[in-house]
Image: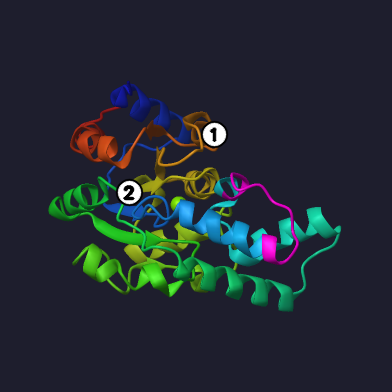
Amino acid sequence: MNDSVQIIRDFVVRHHYEKLHPVAALVDMDGTLYDSMRNHARAWSMMCAEAGLTVDYDEFFMYEGMTGAQTIDIIMQRCRGRHATAEECESLYHRKTELFTSLPAVEVMPGARELTSLMKEVGMRRVLVTGSGQSSLIGRLDSDFPGVFDSNLRVTSKDVAHGKPHPEPYIRAMQLARVTPSQAIAIENAPLGVKSAATSGAFTIGVVTGPVPRAELEGAGAAIVYDSMTECAEAFPTLLYNMLTYVP
Ligand code: MG
């Protein structure tokens, strides 16, 4: 059970903020809005098997949030003892993307529509913050989450020099939303994504939606962790109320 009043107090003190004024919600995509991580892990595993690279299926859940090139480089260093070339990064990521699109369609994460609708209803600015550059899911946002993510309020792998776990994607998102860290809430499901968001100074909500345990999200810097997006959506109004009414 999360005691959000105490968690908010600890967070504000730790960051030396005067108060929290949640104006913007910065939302991750894969594994947060879409139940897409099993397909991603499957596509990565299939691509690696084809290329003769030995990798565990579960490993890909820990790499989530990195750019494709970063993931390929880590695997190359371990399996071949050298960095991946730019050509390898491009061709292997292209093949992974092909395999991903050949898999059964990904579903919206249960609870994600409810949570993003709440954010919209209370007038928070919503910014998408994804390490992905794959158009197959980004292109579905307008039909799956109508009116939630303005096309000008999206940070993808194409918009940053450094992917997660670097804070750049979340800093960029705050610039787009014209907010400071104490005015931003981030929602993430993966350790590297949580680290990126937490380092940017945003109040970071970790959500367990796959095999990665909550301790990994707490260890990466999540201020609060929920065991599903549905639980997060149910708790969100109270969390927001406790933030707005917090006095030092
Ligand atoms: Mg994610």
Q: Gap between marks 1 and 2, in whole Å?
A: 25 Å
Residue 126 lies in quadrant: bottom left
Q: Which residue is mark 2?
A: 183
Compared to residue 196, the image places residue 241 above or below, namely: above
Q: Is 59 a magenta residue?
A: yes
Q: Please state, as top left, top right, bottom left or bottom right, where the N terminus lies in the image.
A: top left
Magenta residues, start to end: 49-60
Compared to residue 124, the image places residue 215 above or below, namely: above
Query: Residue 106: image x %, image y %?
Result: 36, 59
In the image, is 218 to the left or to the right of 138?
right
Q: Earlier in the sequence, mark 1 or mark 2?
A: 2
Residue 204 lies in quadrant: top left
Count neighbours of disc 2 (C-alpha within 10 A) and say few if under 14, some if 14 to 19, many if 20 or more: some
Most prominent secondary structure in the magenta stretch? loop
Q: Is 106 a magenta residue?
A: no
Judged from the image, the secondary structure of the residue bearing numbered disc 1 is helix
Q: Residue at x 60, y 73 (%)?
A: 95
Callout count: 2
Residue 220 lies in quadrant: top right
Count neighbours of disc 1 (C-alpha within 10 A) and say few if under 14, some if 14 to 19, many if 20 or more: some
Queried on whether the Cβ of the residue with tag 2 lies below 8 angstroms from ligand 1, the answer reads no
Is residue 178 shown to the viewer in this render?
no
Query: Residue 223: image x %, image y %?
Result: 42, 34
Compared to residue 122, the image places residue 15 above or below, namely: above
Front position in the image: 43 or 149:
43
Compared to residue 7, the image places residue 120 above or below, namely: below
Query: Residue 231: image x %, image y %?
Result: 27, 35
Q: Which residue is mark 1?
A: 216
Query: Residue 64: image x %, image y %?
Result: 54, 52
Front position in the image: 231 or 239:
231
Amino acid type shown at disc 2: Gln
In the image, is 139 to the left or to the right of 68?
left
